[in-house]
């Protein structure tokens, strides 16, 4: 009887596996019929970097594999298929995925929020503390945007400048100066993450902390505010991937919406630390709200320019259209933290890496800074004159956009006209003018997954001359192609923190380059005879699309000037 039961169970599992495969095949065939003759990949996804193990992973993992492969190929996939839009359908992920590198179509999509909304289901994992500006759509998103926008006012931007200036000098005085005339950075992204975290703590949360604080925490807490932020940011991707039941008992999940503490989950210390960090951060935020509400307008000494204080003020109104609940404030602050920390830290890492490889550009930048500042200290009003510093930041974000694929979907079937994809050689050959003007109609079925693919757009020779060349000068020209540059997205859903990031980056780059010459650590990054500049760049600056485009170890040396 027991043997029969085992055979029955095995047969049932076999039938379920067959049914799952048949279901995937049917969905795949339907998807292929829907997209008709759209250019792109079809099949098992081996061309996109897929592995047999990916067959068993959730759709979002397979989508990530596609994005990684597309990023590594940049615009080359488009020239292979001949058009500026690619549609990929695989057995593992039969929903049509459109990757767009056509500036005209991207502009239309960004300006048509109702026709091409954000696929909010992709962002549900961000609702850890509450609904937020990133995961919301429709009238809820409009309310978040209306209330959050004033928090990024000119007075807050000046606070960003002050905090960045303070933290950079604190880092130099407390850490780098102790190393003497040469600062060794085995992984440059590590100090850049600490730098941007402290800036965010000051400008976003109003909590001023030194570079090297005492490892203590206030009474009633088991973890410092800074440490809780560090752990959450470090392990956030694990939380996104793992199901909630791994994190512990349901009672704790109801409190934090994350999971258990005390090591009850499968991941032991990581689960315990992360669960505690989420609980601790919420406790800190509630205490900060209480402090600000008690102080009110009487406390004239408190700096009221930080983002958190500005959002708290939005809870005092009775107008529902201009009101945020406490959970919504916590939700917005969490995504501001997530978006403003890694993206800027990683971009600054790429900036320093590119300047270490391009010493002529670094020298031009240094001379520009010296011309603007002379012997005096950096001032807030210098921002508008440091245009080459901004150009270096912009060119870095073109080559290494923080988010390589901006997701959208479509609420109805659409037809769009797309351009032919051109190589760099195609753009200069007079005999290929007809090819440069060629267009065709493309059908995008309702409910498709659409990516505004910056890896293709920012390397597209139709808009950028010598797209693989690091050339900040291109952003100093008045006619640079603004419609083909989307590191902060565009339209109604463009990044609220753009000015925050730009100010922060200009101060960091200016202060570091003024004091140090940046070079590659020759002990950890050896020269390869005959290696091209492009190959050398991607060997020093390997990158992977995660929450943001992430550098993977950038060994640099900073020599005092």
Image: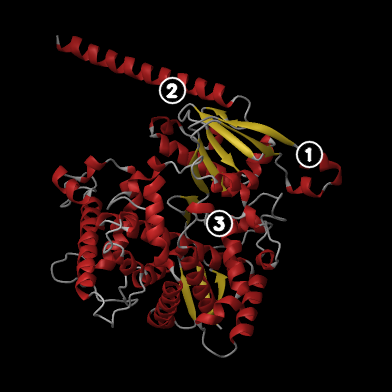
**Disc sitting over residue 293 in the figure:** none
- Tell which circle, 3 or 2, labels the residue nearer the N-terminal end: 2
Circles 3 and 2 in contact, beta carbons < 8 Å: no
Give the vertical position of 432 relative to 369 (above or below).
above
**Disc sitting over residue 400 in the figure:** 3
Q: Tag 1's secondary structure? A: helix
Which sits in the foreground, 177 or 521? 177
Give the vertical position of 182 relative to 22 (above or below).
below
- Tell which circle, 1 or 3, labels the residue nearer the N-terminal end: 3
Q: Residue at x 26, y 77 (%)?
A: 297
Q: Residue at x 60, y 36 (%)?
A: 86
Which sits in the foreground, 17 or 29? 29
Residues at marks 1 and 3, CA–CA distance in whole angstroms: 29 Å
Residues at marks 2 and 1, CA–CA distance in whole angstroms: 38 Å
**Disc sitting over residue 435 in the figure:** 1
Q: Position of residue 273 (x, y in %)?
A: 23, 56
Residues at marks 3 and 2, CA–CA distance in whole angstroms: 35 Å
- Tell which circle, 2 or 1, labels the residue nearer the N-terminal end: 2
Badge 2: how crowded within 10 Å, few (<14), some, or many (20+)? some
Q: Is residue 126 left or right of residue 31?
A: left
């Amino acid at each position: 009887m027991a043997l029969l039961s085992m055979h029955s169970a095995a047969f049932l599992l076999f039938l379920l596996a067959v049914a799952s495969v048949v279901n995937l095949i049917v969905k795949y065939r339907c998807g292929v019929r829907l997209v008709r003759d759209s250019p792109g990949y079809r099949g098992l996804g081996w061309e996109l970097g897929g592995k047999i193990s990916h067959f068993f992973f959730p759709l979002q993992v397979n989508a990530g594999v596609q994005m990684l492969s597309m990023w590594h190929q940049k615009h080359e996939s488009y020239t292979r298929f001949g058009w500026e839009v690619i549609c990929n359908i695989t057995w593992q992920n039969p929903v049509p995925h459109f990757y767009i590198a056509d500036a005209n179509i991207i502009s239309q999509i960004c300006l048509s929020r109702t026709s091409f909304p954000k696929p909010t289901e992709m962002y549900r994992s961000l609702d850890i503390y509450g609904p937020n500006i990133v995961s919301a759509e429709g009238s809820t998103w409009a309310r978040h945007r209306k209330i959050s926008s004033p928090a990024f006012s000119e007075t807050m931007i000046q606070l960003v400048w002050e905090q960045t200036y303070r933290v950079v000098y604190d880092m130099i005085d407390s850490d780098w100066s102790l190393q003497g005339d040469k600062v060794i950075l085995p992984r440059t992204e590590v100090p850049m993450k600490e730098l941007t975290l402290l800036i965010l703590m000051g400008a976003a949360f109003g909590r001023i902390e030194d570079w090297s604080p005492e490892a203590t925490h206030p009474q009633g807490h088991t973890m410092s505010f800074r440490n809780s932020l560090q752990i959450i940011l470090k392990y956030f991707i694990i939380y996104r991937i793992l199901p909630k039941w791994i994190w512990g008992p349901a009672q704790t999940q109801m409190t934090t919406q994350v999971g258990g503490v005390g090591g009850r989950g499968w991941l032991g210390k990581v689960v315990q630390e992360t669960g505690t960090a989420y609980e601790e951060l919420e406790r800190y935020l509630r205490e900060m709200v209480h402090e600000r509400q008690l102080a009110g307008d009487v406390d004239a000494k408190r700096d009221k320019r930080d983002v958190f204080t500005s959002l708290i003020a939005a809870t005092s109104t009775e107008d529902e259209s201009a009101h945020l609940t406490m959970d919504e404030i916590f939700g917005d602050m969490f995504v501001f933290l997530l978006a403003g920390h890694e993206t800027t830290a990683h971009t600054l890492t790429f900036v320093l890496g590119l300047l270490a490889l391009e010493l002529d550009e670094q020298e031009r930048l240094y001379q520009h800074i010296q011309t603007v500042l002379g012997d005096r200290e950096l001032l807030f009003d210098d921002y508008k004159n440091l245009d080459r510093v901004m150009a270096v930041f912009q060119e870095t974000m073109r080559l290494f956009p923080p988010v390589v694929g901006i997701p959208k979907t479509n609420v109805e079937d659409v037809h769009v006209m797309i351009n032919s994809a051109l190589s760099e050689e195609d753009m200069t050959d007079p005999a290929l003018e007809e090819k440069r003007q060629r267009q065709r109609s493309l059908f995008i079925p309702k409910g498709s997954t659409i990516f505004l693919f910056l890896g293709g757009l920012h390397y597209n020779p139709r808009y950028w001359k010598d797209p693989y060349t690091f050339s900040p000068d291109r952003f100093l020209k008045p006619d640079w192609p603004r419609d083909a540059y989307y590191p902060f997205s565009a339209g109604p859903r463009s990044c609220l923190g753009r000015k925050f990031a730009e100010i922060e980056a200009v101060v960091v780059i200016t202060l570091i380059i003024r004091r140090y010459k940046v070079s590659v650590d020759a002990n950890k990054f050896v020269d390869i005879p005959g290696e091209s500049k492009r190959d050398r760049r991607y060997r020093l600056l390997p990158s992977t699309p995660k929450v943001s485009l992430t550098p993977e170890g950038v060994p640099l040396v900073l020599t005092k000037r």
